[in-house]
Image (cartoon, coloured by chain):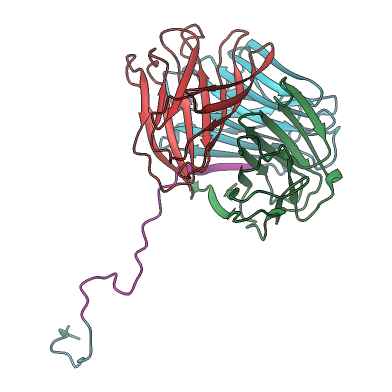
Amino acid sequence: MAAISFKRSSLEDFNKYNSLLVGNEFTPPPADSSYDLLETTTLTSSTSSVTFSGLGSYTDYKHLQIRMVTRSTDSTGDDGVVAQINSDTGSNYAYHGLFGTGSIIGSYAVTSASNPLLFTTANANNATDSFGVGVVDLLDFSSTSKNTTARNLGGSTETNPSIRLTSFVHLNTSAVTSVTLLLQSGTNFVAGSRFSLYGIK
Amino acid sequence: MAYELIETIEVTNATTTDLVFTSIPQDGIDLKLVVSARNSDSAPGVVLITLNNDSGSNYSQEDLEGNGGSVSSNSSTQGYFRLRMTDSGDTANTFGSGQAYISNYTSSSNKSISCDRVTENNASTAYQRIEAVSYSTSSAISSIEIDFLGDNFAQYTTASLYKIY
Amino acid sequence: MATPTYDLLDSTTLASSASSVTFTSIDQSYGDLVVVIDSKGTSTTAIYSYYNSDFTNANYSYVNMTTLGASPSSNTASNPFVGFEGSSLGQSLSLLHIMDYSATDKHKSYLCRNNLPDLLTQAIAGRWSNSSAVSSVTLQLSSGNLVSGSTFYLYGIAK
């Protein structure tokens, strides 16, 4: 059917608008998000480590944050969540912490170390279903001019409770392409442990 | 989404003595400042922060700090608040990491600020600090000034400012 | 694929003093909650964060590191402590992170930074010994009322 203009159509009762917004409220476009969930791993069985890899693809982001809820299968004492950058298992880290255990408060330093400690978590000695928690920030993770410095707040309220502000430096200026989280005891994270990676612009 | 980058400043040479955020948008609720910095000239690497270019004794603060061996606490009222960063005496290429969360920054009440920051160093001494700050003002925050008191920021220092709304 | 997150779910600004502030019917599609409490109180009265109307303090525990008492210390107790509500400056800022709140296979753990600029700063880890998903959060003082002008913001972070 050929197109017919309104003027020559049988439509006589119409209104002409100069704006497509007439009758509609202006809805501004959503603001650009600067805090994005990139990946989440929630364990369905006990696992010795969790690795976020391929981080070089996250070029849109300036910083990374990892939020963790963890429990260990270890039953021999306190257990800590530790990190590795770019699969580096060598003594190429230094780490420090400010901590409180409910009875003591202190600060510590470990130099030329492997497996820097982030926080102590719940384990098999603790109440069923109790987990430790931690939030770690990696600023300028893709820089090739800076050693990677991490800052973490974490803790748990178990038989041996603790709260910690910790940090570590990876003594290498390579960009961060992977982060591995594992346990000081060498045992496993239980099923239900959750690790979420966020990109911040 | 309620978390939006306002601006990132990156130091591209070693002759930058201050970082300034101006004309901060007034349509947010809170601000979050994230800093990765190093003092290229001397120790200590204490970054001084003022708001609205106000260097009067309007910043009350309480801090808890570890230094890798012992713990201390301090209270003071000064013309700035601080985020201690690494300095030229610390392990090369190593920068501090800190954040300052400013609540209700457009309100007409005094501003409450929560700060966490760490330095790092392949040595015994490095600093971990949590700090509470009050900025006495009835003005909205429209600018943030960050400096090393005349010392230079190391190249690759960054400061990012976010609004939360 | 990246998912934009950090969403404002609810907020309250007290127009008059109130015994408590409660966020109810919390959206269960997120992973963590962030509660920002900017209190205008003037006393060092404890703020408690209760979940799902469980007001039994013995079901909660916390550990902190703090400057209270002019010297650094660390404490534990059985209650849902997230900080103190005020100081002589009439200010307190608390940043409370409730982790994995919607999970049903774990107790609910939290981290909190509490700041009273003329008195103390502290970091707290706590736990509600219940594996139910958190559908409500009630903030109230151990005694007395929350002060007019105090603000409470609730954010959700996806997992």
* Residue C67, x across and y down, in percent: 70, 24
Position above or below: A91 against A68: above
Residue B112 falls left or right of residue B71: left
Q: Which chain is green?
A: C
* Total numbered badges shown on the rendered structure: 0
Answer yes or no: is residue B151 visible: yes
Q: In which quadrant is the C terminus of chain A drawn?
A: top left
Q: Is residue A66 magenta?
A: no
- Which chain did the image draw in cyan? A
Q: Main secondary structure of the magenta part?
A: loop
Left or right: where A78 falls relative to B112: right
Q: Nearer the viewer, residue C91 or A12?
A: C91
| Residue sitting at the far left | A8
Which quadrant of the rendered structure holds the N terminus of chain A? bottom left
- Please identify the quarter of the rendering in which residue B22 is found: top left
Residue occupying image coordinates x 52% and y 48%: C5
Q: The chain shown in red is which?
A: B
In the displayed structure, would residue C55 be above or below residue B153?
below
Residue B65, picture quadrant:
top right
Residue A38 drawn at (x, y percent): 52, 42
Q: Which of C63 and A178 is in front in this view?
A: C63
Left or right of A174: which side holds C85? right
Residue C14: image x %, image y %? Answer: 61, 54
The front one of A140 and A88 is A140
Is residue A21 highlighted in magenta? yes
Res. A141 visible in picture:
no
The quarter holding residue C128 reads top right
- Compared to C126, does A145 lie above or below? above
Q: Residue C126 placed where, x, y %?
A: 75, 38
Determine the residue positioned at 23% across, 86% down: A14
Magenta-colored span: A16-41
